[in-house]
Image (spheres, grey):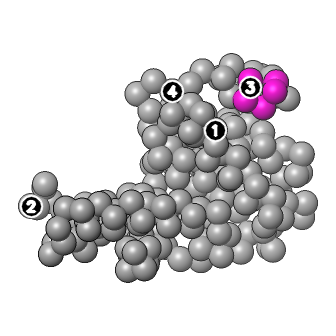
Amino acid sequence: MCEAYVSDIYEYLHNMEVHRRPIADYIEKVQKDVGINMRGVLINWLVEVTEEYKLLSHTLYLTVSYIDRFLSVNVLNRKRLQHLGVSSMLIAAKYEEISPPHMEDFCYITENTYTKQEVVKMEADVLKALNSEMGNPTVKSFLRRITIVAQEDYELSSYMQLEFLGYYLAKLSLLEYGCLKFLPSMVAASVIFLS
């Protein structure tokens, strides 16, 4: 759609994906109380929250990116992991959504485990850890472009299958801690290749 600019745009995104990414092995190197399985359970729950509030899928991808980037530089007690998740999702929703859910909605979804003040405090901590750099490319950022390029010779029905399977595999990659060692563009290319 913007053929004259596409090379510059993706060059910028590739540069940014290198600089705004988590440490690939932060659970082993930084965390003491948070494990790989706990991260997976949290992200799986956040997928459900995304569906419950009908949030955009890019909001979910940004949320996971914020969580991983935060945990790369801050040791967190496992009891505060869900707190980090809802605060990160609140930030991502404010950044990405036209009408983000209210803070009370995020308190409610955790059965009021956290007060509004606690969520605001964690939100500030996350923003500080991110250096207020909330925009960063995710797998979703690259998926659409790679899908369009990959489907040039496909019929519409085959293209739709390719696209949906690609999005499904990309969402599954969010759960896989091992995928952090790969750049988002590489994960996007891999899911389309596999699709």
> Any mark on residue 49, and which?
1
Counting residues from the start of the chain, the first of labels 1 and 2 encountered is: 2
Mark 1, Cα crowd under 10 Å, few <14 / some 14-19 / many 20+, is: some
Could you tell me how far apart the alpha carbons at marks 3 and 2 are, in whole angstroms? 45 Å
Give the Cα separation between the discs numbered 2 and 4. Answer: 33 Å
What residue is shown at x 61% (from left), y 47% (from top)?
Answer: 47
Sequence-wise first label, 1 or 4: 1
Ranked by sequence position, the earlier of labels 3 and 2 is: 2
- Contact check, label 1 and label 4, Cβ < 8 Å: no
Q: Quadrant of residue 36?
A: bottom right
Residue at left 56%, top 25%?
101
In the rendered image, residue 109 lying in the magenta stretch gets the answer yes
Report the Cα–Cα distance between label 4 and label 3: 14 Å
Q: Which amino acid type is marked by label 1?
A: Val
Real-space Cα distance between discs 1 and 4? 13 Å
19 relative position to 67: left or right = left
How far apart are labels 1 and 3 at the CA level?
A: 12 Å
For marks 3 and 2, give the one nearer the viewer. Answer: 3
- Which is more N-terminal, label 3 or label 4? 4
Choose the circle earlier in sequence order: 2 or 4.
2
Picture residue at 63% right of the left edge, 38% below the top: 49
The percent position of residue 185, horizontal first and vertical second, equals: 41, 71
Q: On the rendered image, what quadrant is the C terminus found in?
A: bottom left
Q: From the viewer's perspective, is the residue at label 1 or at label 3 nearer?
A: 1
Residue linked to disc 2? 4
Label 3 environment density (alpha carbons within 10 Å; few <14, some 14–19, many ≥20): some
Secondary structure beneath label 1: helix
194 to 93, vertically: above or below? below
The numbered disc on residue 107 is: 3
For the residue pair 194 and 112, the one nearer the viewer reads as 194
Q: Which residue is mark 4?
A: 100
